[in-house]
Image (cartoon, rainbow, N blue to C red):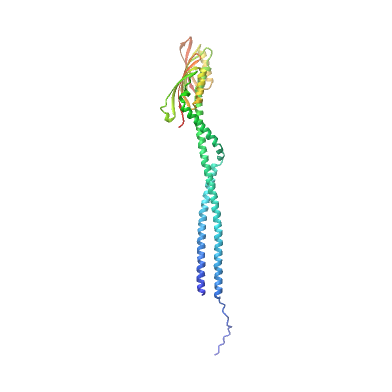
Amino acid sequence: MKVAISVIFGILTALVLVIGGYLGFATIRESKGLLREVDSLQTRVNSLKSEVAGRAERLQEEATIAAELDSLRSALQASEEGLEERFTHPGRPTSKAVISDSQKVEGIYPFKLKVDGAASAVDSFLIELQRQVPLVRFEKLEGVRKGRNLRLEATGSARFPR
Amino acid sequence: MIRIDLAVPRRRERLTTWHYLVIWVCVFLFVVVGAGIGLVFQGRRLKSIEQENASLRATSDSLKTQKTAVAHYENIEAQYRELLGKIEDASRYNERYLEVMRLLDAKLGPRMKLVSFQIEADSATAMVLAPSNLEVRRYVDALLGSAMFELITSEPRGSREGLIQHRLLLRMR
């Protein structure tokens, strides 16, 4: 009888020890895996924090900058679409422009512009042209003075971003 | 010969079956309780690590979202600055042309006339009429004084309207 009790309880105790040991080791293994993950997450979080630090505050300006960018792009688009009208002026000074659209795909419009009028009016015309077509670039200005008048021939290109 | 056994017969103390059962039950319970307590502690520790993990994962996700937003903002800002830079650059570039054109007019001396000019990116030529070579000299000095030009050479080109015609070659800074 005693032997039977010893065998039964011995087996039960051994079973409990084996199951407990297995569960214990499994938990430890899982804990170690999780701790490694925690370490790597902590490193990633620290790195992300340092990347974002000082820059996240600027996110509040995003709406403003995005609106300004949109407005600038719209202005440039309008400028490109109405390029011919912006170069020609029916009053004084008079102006004629030949604009090539052979490089339209790249957004480049070479031009030859003739302006005729009072020197100060020609100067104002060129300033206004610069305002209306902000990405215009002169290459050559050739002028002939006739008294107070100036006959100006300008070559250059308007370059729009693509 | 008579042998006398003087030893006192002792009753052998042996564990009964019940004792045996009780001891084994105690051992078994001790092991079960010990293992249970150990597993509970391990489980708690595991849960706490899991919570820390989940919290860090949430922080990481939130920071990642923030980083994406920051990258998006910086992309927009870079595009805006680039466009603005191009416009300012073009404006500065053209302003040089206009400035040269104005200077050629503004620095003319009395009775001097500007006949024609040609302005390019780094040089300009101008045809002027002046009553004397001295006036041309003064004109050249005045232009050099503007700090826009680094070298000016002048060549007389005959006379016109009773004035000496000079061709000026200007190299811009």
Residue B168 in picture, x, y percent from top left: 47, 17
- Residue furthest to the top in view is B162
Residue at the image point whose x is 50% and y is 73% from the top: A4
Residue B132 in picture, x, y percent from top left: 51, 11
Q: Is residue B58 visible?
A: yes
Q: Is residue A42 visible?
A: no
Residue at the image point whose x is 52% and y is 58% from the top: A27
Residue at the image point whose x is 55% and y is 62% from the top: B36
Residue A63 in picture, x, y percent from top left: 54, 36
Residue at the image point whose x is 55% and y is 52% from the top: B51
For the N terminus of chain B, give its image quadrant: bottom right
Residue B131 in picture, x, y percent from top left: 51, 11
- Residue furthest to the left in view is A102
> Which one is nearer the viewer's eye here, B27 or A97?
A97
Against A159, residue B104 (above or below) is: above
Count the numbered circles shown.
0
> Which one is nearer the viewer's eye here, B55 or A42?
B55
> Which one is nearer the viewer's eye here, A78 or B117?
A78
